[in-house]
Amino acid sequence: MKLTFWGAARTVTGSMHEVAFNGSRFLLDCGQYQGRRQEARERNSNFPFPASSVDAVILSHAHIDHSGNLPVLVKRGFNGPIYASSATADLCVPMLADSAHLQEMDAMFLNKRRGRRRLLGDIEDGGDIQPIYTTEDAQRTYPLFRPVAANEPREIAPGLTYVNHDAGHMLGSTFVVLEAKENGRTVRLGFSGDVGRPGLPIVRDPEAPPALDYLILESTYGNRLHTDIGPVKQKLADVVNRTAGRGGKIIVPAFAVGRTQQLVVVLHDLMNESAIPSIPIFVDSPLAVNVTEVFRKHRELYDAETQAFLDNGQDPFGFARLRYIREVAESKALNELRGSFVVISASGMCEAGRILHHLRNNISDPRNTVLITGFQAENTLGRKIVEKEREVPIFGEPVRLRAEVVKINELSGHADQDELLNWMAPAAPGLKKVFLVHGEPSQSGGLARAIRDRFGIEAEIPERGDSAVL
């Protein structure tokens, strides 16, 4: 078995790892790379191998940095199965459709701007920018999904078996175990996907891994320790109360899948307890609306606390002051709304979608708050806001940042260093090597040292294109 790292190598986005076995080629994830526009476009448009040579994709979960480049793979000639949990397959339908739509709209916006610049003579006519993939490309991807039940082995090639386990990161998220048998020998490779944290809202805690020979492990927060999840409700209440007290708005960039639903459940709790004022709460994302319906469908995956809403006859994702926004006109109307309110909108890293309009219209007002609740990759607008740059670029124009910026890490869907070490501990006695991915170098480096110190296991941090024979 040969392993090659093509994405999320010394960076957080674009998860994609190639497994070659007995003449077959498989991908662990096929995620969209996010970062500088031109570099992202180049990476996402081209694969370092013929797409038609890929026999199957094994998908850990539905987040776009893990699934978002599947339509390009299909566009380039892939037509094999995409193995995933049932919830992941269901979530990918609205998510990939939304991603395609955003890319079409982004291309349209850029072409309009280029057209104006051509008229002024600022640029030569180099032709229109095309979206990386279209809605039609996304639609051709859906029939390839093959839902796989948790903990049920699936043979995906002669001598190669795949099993998924609950990773506790988001609804339907899994970690993957591949077992290869060849010439009387067996090799077991684990791929963590994204490992969640014990105690996260909605989802159950991560399962412990079985015995493994090798492990591909995420390292998003590999050199950090989160604060305890317990105070998150109080912190969120403090932000809402403080901002509402000065008549401001709370703008929340949030991933439409997972983070939005977590925030809704926590805000529902706070409303029930009268811990925050009864101000309007808007989820302004057609994707989040569609995704929430998938969450409602997969009740079998809820943790005990979320199940308790159902037991009490309540919808965890719906309450009196909450309103879901689909139409563009309704979204634009929020810009004219007076008084305090909360708006939760995608994308989580502020790279596309309606959140850009809310930020452009609100971050210059010091009464308002931008609440960041998730990881912000390098070179994204979200990272620039977290670092409180005086001016940030929105739609290519600088906007002064005067709003309060608050970061709440407690809802992070990624395990921290201690949680990652504790999660891998059951598999550690048999591990020959760990490959650290999905992390910036400082995070991967810190986790590599911790793994060596605690378990005495070699932890490698591969570059993009590095290979290893297992």
Image: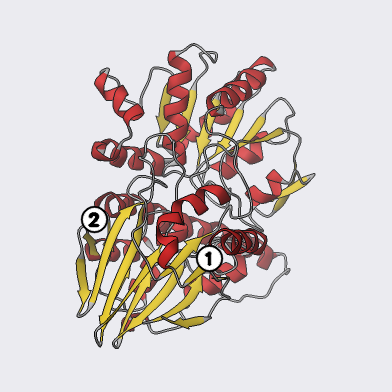
Looking at the rendering, which quadrant does residue 141 occupy?
bottom left
Crowding around mark 1 (Cα neighbors within 10 Å: few <14, some 14 to 19, many 20+) is many
Residue 334 relative to residue 368: left or right: left
Report the quarter where the N terminus lies: bottom left
Which colour scheme appears in the figure? secondary structure
Tag 2: amino acid: Asn
Quarter holding residue 164: bottom left
In the figure, 63 relative to 242: above or below?
below
Q: Position of residue 323 (x, y in %)?
A: 41, 26
Which residue shows up at 53% across the image and 80% down it? 465
Above or below, comparing residue 443 to residue 274 in the picture: below
Determine the CA span between mark 2 and mark 1: 24 Å
Identify residue for label 1.
437
Quadrant in the rendering for residue 23: bottom left
On the image, the x and y values in percent for residue 276 come to 54, 15
Q: Residue at x 53, y 73 (%)?
A: 43
Q: Residue at x 47, y 81 (%)?
A: 468
Q: Label 2, on which residue?
A: 151
Q: Residue at x 77, y 46 (%)?
A: 389
Quadrant containing the C terminus in the rendered view: bottom left
Whether residue 394 is visible to the viewer of this picture, yes or no, is no
